[in-house]
Image (tube, rainbow, N blue to C red):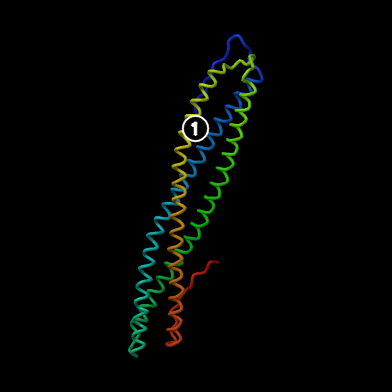
Amino acid sequence: SFRTIIVDCHPQKQWTPRDEKLLNLYRQLHDIQIAISELYATLNKDYHALQREMEKMHTELKQVKLKFASLSRLADRIAELLQLKLDTREPFEALQLELKSANTAIHEFHHRLATLTGDVQETNQRREDLITDLETEEEILFEQLSQLKITYGYDDNLCIDYSSFDADEAQFLDKVNYKNRDQEAQLFFFDSTTENFCKLQLETEILYAQWQEFGKRLHLIKIFTGRDFGFLPISNN
């Protein structure tokens, strides 16, 4: 439970439907705090999983970049040999072999990034929808409690002791405020994870553009030599 509600009742007064309504509304506010806390706990777990996957993909992206750099050097070497009209058989074979490995690496990375993109989008949307729904419900309940307290404020027939209710509510609000501060820190982590994903996307888009340009270089070499290296472009389909 979020916390235990402790209020005093007047021993000489009977429990009324108004007491029941006030206490039920107060309980609902406690229940909504539990729902919000559980949502944040789930989101925190999900965003940490996304962050771990991004860290793996950053490492993988570095390996893809290393493969691409090696390919570029081989292509430069072939271009030099072609200009000098020298034997290109050895760098051709090396390029074809390394390109096969690079094709596999960059396309596997591309598919994993597509999956991660979907996961990030789904998590962000779920976070936005559910937090908005719960916080809206929380706001409505607080407003209803406030109005009910105004309505009941001068009701001498209530069994609940108002001073003890106010004291308990003060403790409740202290805990809510503490929870809100903790959740603000979690929101910062959620936003930071999304920002890290955007950086990964940008870094990847730069690599993809370079990869497509590299494909054009290989096509020019193919025109001059008739050699097809089996370059596979990146497709968003």
Residue plotted at (33% across, 89% down): 84
Which residue is at the far top? 12
In the rendered image, the vertical position of residue 170 relative to residue 75, given as above or below: above
The one nearer the camera, 128 or 104, is 128
Is 43 left or right of 155, judged from the image as shown?
A: left
Whole-percent x, y for residue 53 in the image: 43, 54
Q: Using residue 216 as the reference point, say whether residue 93 is left or right of it.
A: left
- Quadrant of res 155: top right
- Determine whether 173 is above or below 66 in the image: above
Question: Mark 1 falls on what kind of element?
Answer: helix
Picture mark count: 1
Q: Position of residue 235 (x, y in %)?
A: 52, 69
* Residue 19 drawn at (x, y percent): 62, 20
Quarter residue 181 falls in: top left
From the viewer's side, name the closer residue of 22 and 233. 22
Position of 40 relative to 74 (above/below): above
Q: Residues within 10 Å of mark 1 (few under 14, many from 20)?
A: some
Q: Determine whether, in the image, residue 106 is placed left or right of residue 21.
A: left
The percent coordinates of residue 132 (x first, y second) are: 57, 43
Q: Which residue has dot 1 on it?
A: 176
Query: In the visual, does 120 lie left or right of 88?
Result: right
Direction bottom: furthest residue:
85
Give the position of the C terminus as an image quadrant. bottom right
**Residue at 46% over, 57% down:** 198
Circle 1: residue type = Val
Query: What residue do we see at 48% from left, 25% from top?
Result: 171
